[in-house]
Amino acid sequence: MRKTATKKKKSSTPTGVLAQARMAVRDRFEHQADDIWGLVMLVVGLILLLGFFSFSGPLGDAVVTGLRFLFGVWAILVPTAILLVGLTLIIGKVRDGDHARLPLGLGFLFFGSLGLFHLLSGTEPLAAGVEVVADRGGVIGALISFPIRRVVGLLGAFIILSAVIGVGALIVTRSTLREAALAVGELGRTLVRRVKHAMQSYRRPDRPHVQSPDPAPVVAAKKPERARPPRADQKSKRPPVKKPEPEQPIPRVAPNKNYVKPPLDLLSPGRGGTQDKRSLEATGRELEATLRQHGVDARLVRIVPGPTVTRYEIELAPGVKVNKITSLTNDIGYALATPDVRILAPIPGKSAVGVEVPNKKRRLVTLKDILDSPEARENDNPLAVALGMNISGRPVMVNLNELPHVLIAGATGAGKSSCINALVTSILVRALPEEVRLILVDPKRVEMGQYDDVPHLLTKVITNPKKAADALNWAVDEMDRRYQLLADAGVRDITGYHEKWDAGGLETDSFDRFPYIVIVVDELNDLMMVAGKVVESSIVRIAQMARAIGIHLV
């Protein structure tokens, strides 16, 4: 028993000594803790801040690179915040309860503002690439804003992140919502008073100083009162500055009979790459065997190979339910060693079920393959553009006047710019300048610069949002003018107008054979954010009314 007690006493002795040492150190430096931490934060913040200007060596540069990766363009606020907190600790403005409150409130403010900045600058996901995300709110900003936008949309994400910023402001200022509302109201009243005072001070020198030594200046006192209305009238009689009306991009030109359409030889041909017939048949046999193993009596009747997907058409035996094969999607994908199996049950217009399997070797579809096809040669509509190939490898042409407007959407890398370039190139290759004219709006300045000298353009490629608004306003005026011509000609749309013109039923002095106009806007989201109020009404009017008179918006 004595030995046990002795052991316990010996084992507890080091712990007691350490505890006493910690207490002694804490008591000795407790009143200097804020100064020590403040000095440490000042040094760290200063080194990081110098790193943004390449004055802190390789370690500082590496840390700054990491901060930019995490916080994007807001990374410089991190060392700034560390410096401010360090100064606050040294000055001694931090109360006992503020050590937990201030970091929490500043965290809400910083991360809420970071997410809101990333949201308003495009909300690019992490899949867009490190450089794209780092030019906005960084990885942290993307992780905050992108999931919220995916769930509640742009407006909902804006409201949520604004609320987070408001919560942070309330925590930092130790305020309640009522106190914040009263403070905002008082600030508004103070601002109004100062504006009124400034306006009165601005008007005082303009008042006529009429002084009279007469002791009864009743009439003289009224002279300034009489003199003020004419000055106001003079201001009101100034001719109003007329808002310049949107000019027509360029004057109309006569048809050029010597113009020759660009040959298709300028386009690159496809590489071919047809699927191996034996491989397709082997996959079909594996598909039939898989269905039999799961008790589905079916027969492969046709194989339709496409550029990226091959469709296997299966005919079910009498009495076999269609949903029995649709429930086997995962099993079929496992048997064919592919995760992306799509079952079309049934195929429209056929008594068969389609099983679509991605090709192991995909065929590159080029624009020349589509424009040089019989489908394109037989379609003489100037607004017929190449869209791609269907699942069976047949070219697909679509007429813009049947859509009548196009909205192209998709994630980064989905092919939006390729689709726009294919659309514009189709028009340039197939239509004459007097048949189709183009207005191209490219806020990014890098997508459509190659089309700057083509004769189909009504104006140079537009990169300025203000000029884009002027072009859209001109399109609205042109739409109204064309509708008036249609009314005078007694026709309902541009097709009837052209037919009547070609038949000689319209006077050349009063009418003109106006072409189709295609307005292509790249990055509409950016244009709406920069000049939304200016262009929104024009876009709405064009989208609602411009189809019948040959103006189409992409």
Image: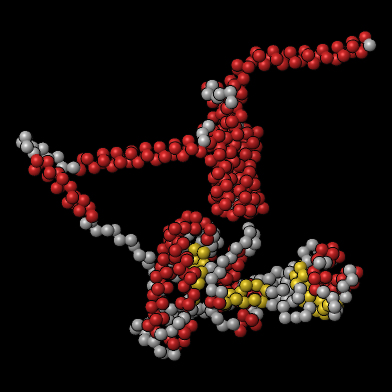
Front residue (pair 4, 329): 4
Residue 46 visible: no
Image location (x, y in percent) of residue 365: 68, 71
User: To which quarter of the image does residue 44 belong?
Assistant: top right
Query: Relative to 367, does residue 90 appear above or below in the rendering?
Result: above
Residue at image point 61% right, 74% down: 386
Front residue (pair 279, 240): 240
Residue at image point 37% right, 85% down: 508
Residue at image point 12% right, 44% down: 222
Image location (x, y in percent) of residue 343: 77, 70
Instruction: Name the side, left or right, on which 374 lies relative to 543.
Output: right
Image location (x, y in percent) of residue 359: 78, 68
Front residue (pair 418, 506): 506
**Screen quadrant of the N terminus:** top right
Residue 161 visible: yes
**Color style of the picture:** secondary structure
Q: In this view, which residue lies farthest toward the front?
A: 178
Q: In this view, which residue lies farthest toward the top?
A: 2
Residue at image point 43% right, 86% down: 501
User: To which quarter of the image does residue 509 belong?
Assistant: bottom left
User: To which quarter of the image does residue 392 belong?
Assistant: bottom right
Image location (x, y in percent) of residue 141: 61, 45
Instruction: Name the side, left or right, on which 238 lies relative to 387.
Output: left
